[in-house]
Amino acid sequence: MTEFLKTLLVAIFLIGGQPAFADTADTAEINGEAKKLHQLFEDEWAERMKDEPLAATYAGVADYNHRLACVTEDCYLEQQGEDRAFLGRLRGIDRTILSEEDQLNYDLFAFELEARIVQADFATWRIPFLADFGFYSSIMSLSESMPFKTVKDYENYIARLNDVARYFNEQIANMRAGLADGFTQPKVILGRIIPVVASQLSDNPEETAYFEPFNEMPDFFSEQDRARLIKAGLKAIEGSVLPAFARLHAFLVDEYQPATREAIGISGTPEGREYYAALVRYYTTFDITPEEVHQIGLDEVARIRAEMEAIIEKVEFEGSFAEFLEFLRTDPQFYAKTARQLLAEASYHAKRIDGKMPEFFGKLPRLSYGVRAVPDEIAPAYTTGRYWGGSYENGRAGNYMVNTYALDKRPLYNLPSLTLHEGVPGHHHQISLAQEQENVPMFRKNFYLSAFGEGWGLYSEKLGIEMEIYEDDYQNFGRLSYEMWRAGRLVVDTGIHAFGWSRDQAVALFVENSALSTHNINTEVDRYISWPGQALAYKMGELKIIELRERAEEALGEDFDIRAFHDAVLENGSIPLTILEAKIDAFIEREKEESE
């Protein structure tokens, strides 16, 4: 793993001071290296689409719509070999003579390949699920993710349904390997997974979501085709999908849950400490230790707590901090009475923000987004809200998903922050612009780094102050509570996975310092337990973007243009924060030159 970490850090820091072109290179040599680079991108993308059929469907590549991925150990090792070969080809290209844009392509491609290689080195395929998402979730949403315009589309869907049995059997084998190696999810997480899987147990295939496409076949299909497709679809659901979920449920209940680990921190697994250190570097895109991250979190928690207490004093609440939090968690005025009311409130904030966007951004995406409820079958264990990406090319809007389960745990004062983060100018804006980049390799349009994307989402929540989105002190307290949530993640994630914290310690930090409902806190803590390192991305990314904005404002003074700055942050899609820093430094120099 030492070699991986060395190479990963090279990928992170391979920026800045290198020239766009080497002085000694001639045009033919430059063009030759660029051609090799882009052929490499095309070859890797084609291989990735073959290896990841669901991702191919999402990207609009229909060649593999009839099947699911091979997820055996042999297939993963083969893919790792492919990635190592691609990396070898990349290292054989002279980066120094490439154009500035191709140097960026080179660096991002190296970063992505290295990340995939380390995942394979740790055999992460042995844990194929998180607290709120897993391989089974992709099957549960299959009817929403595939096209249903032609007879061939339906035949592909049926073939993919028939492949579910094989796919689940391979995933169960992977989890058995994890049990044998001591590399599993902790026992506490299974209480969230098993009910979701159980929701798919049925004796009537026609009542399942998998059959819904057969109720909505295009009018131009012949009666013969309709009858044939319905018969084949029912057979696939009854013979493949439902038995696969039944086998998975039995395995989780009878075999996995009883034998999985009690300890919640990943450091307690074989190679766990080394694995977590690598995850910290990956998810922050910095060369930083868990100890350093933990201290940053403690400092941020103290700062935000002081701002929260100032609001309590401003609203003249008579009581302690804990009593104010209890007031926010329990007073009916802060909660919707129906799911429709909660969705309507989220939609209201979304449209208000839409109306402010041109003041703060010069470039807006073409793709629109909607507001939807999290599906009922996954809502109990799902986070408060999330963005589900769309595709302009495939005619699929983005969606800001709002969890309407347990309405008395979904305070309205949090909705402005949540909407800013998940919709615009947060995830929908950033991801859609990345997808709409022109003249970049396909991997760039689908490249996502949590430190950048989630850091931008959290920055967007704070930007809501300037956009005048927060309408009262309670909504601003909700914003601070969300910021406290992300600062607390730095403390809790490192606490759990590096310092041996208990689940109760993690829950207590959020209960004592934020207005999040206890239901939400418990859901989130289980998410951090199941997904080591990812929770660090939000606050670390936001702090870097704020630092870069302050640097630009100081350097440019009255010539600072907020729209130009935001466009500069987002113009290259998702990138490591070290590369972002170099890009913003270059932006500052360009702005200085133009103002002279």
Image (cartoon, rainbow, N blue to C red):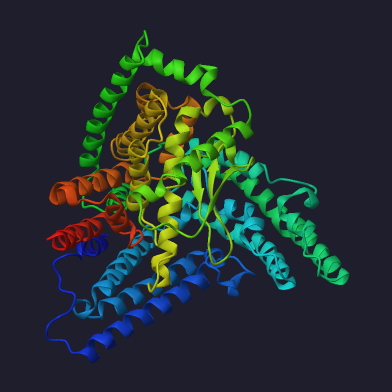
Task: Kindly identify the residue that appears in the image at 53 percent across and 63 percent down.
Answer: 392
Residue at the top extreme of this rendering: 318
Q: Is residue 474 left or right of residue 247?
A: left
Task: Kindly identify the residue that appears in the image at 22 percent across and 32 percent down.
Answer: 299
Estimate the x, y position of residue 13 in percent, counting from the top left.
20, 61
Estimate the x, y position of residue 96 in percent, counting from the top left.
18, 77
Estimate the x, y position of residue 210 in percent, counting from the top left.
71, 55
Where, quadrant-wise, is the N terminus in this rendering? bottom left
Work out whether residue 142 can be spotted: yes
Task: Kindly identify the residue that appears in the image at 45 percent across and 38 percent down.
Answer: 418
Task: Kindly identify the residue that appears in the image at 25 percent across and 64 percent down.
Answer: 11
Work out whether residue 551 can be spotted: no
Residue at the right extreme of this rendering: 223
Where, quadrant-wise, is the C terminus in this rendering? bottom left
Q: Is residue 430 left or right of residue 168?
A: left
Image quadrant where residue 27 sits = bottom left
Estimate the x, y position of residue 15 in percent, counting from the top left.
20, 65
Q: Is residue 297 left or right of residue 191?
A: left
Q: Nearer the viewer, residue 406 or 64?
A: 406
- The answer to whether 89 is drawn above or below residue 143 in the figure is below
Q: Nearer the viewer, residue 73 or 242?
A: 242
- The answer to whether 509 is drawn above or below residue 17 in the figure is above
- The answer to whether 124 is drawn above or below residue 108 in the figure is above
